[in-house]
């Protein structure tokens, strides 16, 4: 252990970590990044196969984004966003409205994904209360959902690892069984189903629609649940149901937006527009914290009045609409426009699919390889026939991750799922390193030659 690791462990409490693990696997101190690679203080390189928690799109130390930051720092670093504004925020809001699904015409700024979700929940609730829908106080989410870790976001999530201990602090919500395409109880597949699993949502709405103000969902991929991928028809049915019962459709595109699924936003696969959309992560290409909550004109107008009726949305952050972060987001959109990112990603996605499927098809412990765009996931199972997963206490994914780090690849797992979510700047040689290392470590763990 070097001096920097010792100081880190003396002072820092890391997120999503059992700190006792760090006794024999101390934090890797990164000194610099370039493209899809990170370099530690000892000169070792690591392919960032998870985009540093799904945020990095165009590589580390991207020259275009670096220059955008430099220019903005020389003009304006921050200004109060109440009754003041600035060009980078105005430009960003206009551009986001123009590329998101139709009807999302107003943009509320915050600084991280959980905050964007909190904003969405509060807006939906307050909207209904101000319109006299006093019974509408509940939200709906699906099983295995993850929407962040503030108390409101946890309340509409369904991963006990994050939320169980806080159950008594959280608001009451409705939860219904969501899609589980790998273990489909209806015997269907993603390619041929009609979202038979939607019947639980329909029944819940029929019984409780008078109490429901909004339903929140991660479109097409439940990321933290293990990159669970489901078909667009589920979203189409949900859109129709929300419209029928005057319930807000809240799309959490925080992890799946900005090209991850092969389209700019996941909702595009279903051809639907939500009432509220949350975006963050890739919005600034992994550089700085920024989040947006987009809403329809109808929702915005319910808050438009003078102070006599107290209809204003009283939610704020000190760094709301920061000019530097907005400038980075604008340059992110410039890169998408100038460098044909989505088209290039199609080729890279196909290459990942071809490489992984060849290796996974007869593997005794890989139950499924699933992929959508630049997201791929290997689900490891104890028994392929029954699809029985490994006991989480065995920490199969974590142990494979630990084997991959010394080999120069960052493959942070999700339980029994090893996933690929690399920056868009990866080349074929990087993809080969990522996939080959993953399979080498999986085989090493299971003792397969």
Image (tube, helix red, strand yellow):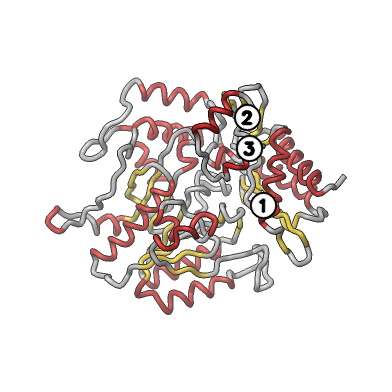
Q: Earlier in the sequence, mark 3 or mark 1?
A: 3
Task: Kindly identify which residue carries mark 3.
Answer: 23
Numbered tag placed on residue 417 in the rendering = 1
For the C terminus, the image quarter is top right
Numbered tag placed on residue 437 in the rendering = none
Whole-number angstrom distance, CA of label 2 to CA of label 3: 26 Å
- Residue 343, located in which quarter of the rendered image? top right
Locate residue 191, reporting x and y percent: 66, 63
At numbered mark 2, what does the secondary structure look like: helix, strand or loop?
strand
Q: Name the outermost residue toward the left.
A: 308
Q: Earlier in the sequence, mark 2 or mark 3?
A: 3
Q: Residue at 52%, 42% (x, y): give it.
A: 15
At numbered mark 1, what does the secondary structure look like: helix, strand or loop?
strand
Q: Residue at 65%, 48% (x, y): give it.
A: 376
User: Residue 422 versus residue 225: which sits nearer the camera?
Assistant: 225
Q: Name the outermost residue toward the bottom.
A: 207
Q: Earlier in the sequence, mark 1 or mark 2?
A: 2
Whole-number angstrom distance, CA of label 1 to CA of label 2: 22 Å
Q: Few, some or many C-alpha atoms within 10 Å of disc 3 (few <14, some 14-19, many ≥20)? A: few
């Amino acid at each position: 252990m070097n001096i920097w690791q010792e100081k880190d462990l003396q002072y820092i409490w890391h997120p999503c970590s059992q700190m006792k693990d760090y006794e024999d696997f101390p934090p890797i101190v990164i000194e610099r990044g370039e493209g899809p690679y990170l370099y530690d203080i000892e000169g070792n390189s690591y392919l960032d196969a998870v985009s540093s928690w799904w945020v990095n799109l165009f590589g580390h130390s991207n020259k275009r984004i670096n220059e955008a930051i430099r220019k903005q720092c020389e003009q304006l670093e921050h200004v109060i966003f109440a009754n003041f504004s600035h060009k980078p925020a105005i430009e960003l809001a206009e551009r986001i409205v123009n590329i998101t699904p139709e009807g999302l015409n107003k943009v509320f700024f915050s600084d991280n994904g959980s905050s964007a979700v909190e904003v969405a929940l509060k807006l939906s609730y307050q909207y209904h209360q101000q319109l006299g829908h006093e019974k509408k106080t509940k939200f709906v989410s699906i099983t295995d959902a993850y929407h962040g870790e503030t108390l409101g976001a946890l309340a509409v999530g369904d991963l006990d690892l994050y939320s169980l201990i806080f159950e008594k602090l959280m608001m009451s919500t409705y939860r219904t069984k969501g899609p589980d395409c790998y273990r489909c109880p209806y015997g269907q597949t993603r390619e041929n189903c009609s979202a038979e699993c939607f019947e639980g949502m329909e029944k819940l709405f029929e019984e409780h629609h008078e109490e429901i103000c909004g339903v929140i969902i991660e479109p097409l991929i439940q990321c933290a649940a293990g990159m669970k991928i489901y078909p667009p028809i589920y979203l189409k049915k949900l859109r129709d149901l929300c419209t029928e019962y005057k319930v807000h459709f809240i799309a959490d595109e925080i992890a799946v937006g900005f090209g991850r699924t092969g389209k700019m936003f996941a909702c595009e696969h279903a051809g639907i527009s939500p009432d509220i959309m949350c975006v963050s992560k890739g919005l600034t290409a992994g550089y700085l914290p920024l989040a947006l909550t987009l809403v329809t004109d109808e929702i915005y107008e319910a808050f438009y009045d003078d102070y006599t009726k107290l209809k204003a949305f009283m939610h704020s952050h000190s760094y709301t609409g920061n000019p530097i972060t907005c400038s980075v987001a604008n340059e992110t959109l410039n890169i998408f426009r100038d460098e044909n990112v989505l088209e290039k990603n199609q080729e890279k996605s196909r290459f990942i699919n071809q490489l992984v499927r060849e290796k996974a098809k007869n593997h005794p412990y890989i139950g499924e390889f699933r992929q959508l765009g630049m997201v791929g996931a290997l689900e490891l199972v104890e028994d392929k026939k029954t699809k029985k997963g490994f006991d989480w206490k065995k920490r199969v994914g974590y142990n494979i991750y630990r084997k991959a780090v010394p080999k120069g690849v960052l493959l942070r797992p999700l339980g029994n799922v090893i996933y690929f979510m690399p920056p868009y700047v990866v080349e074929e040689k990087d993809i080969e390193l990522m996939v080959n290392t993953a399979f080498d470590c999986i085989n090493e763990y299971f003792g397969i030659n």
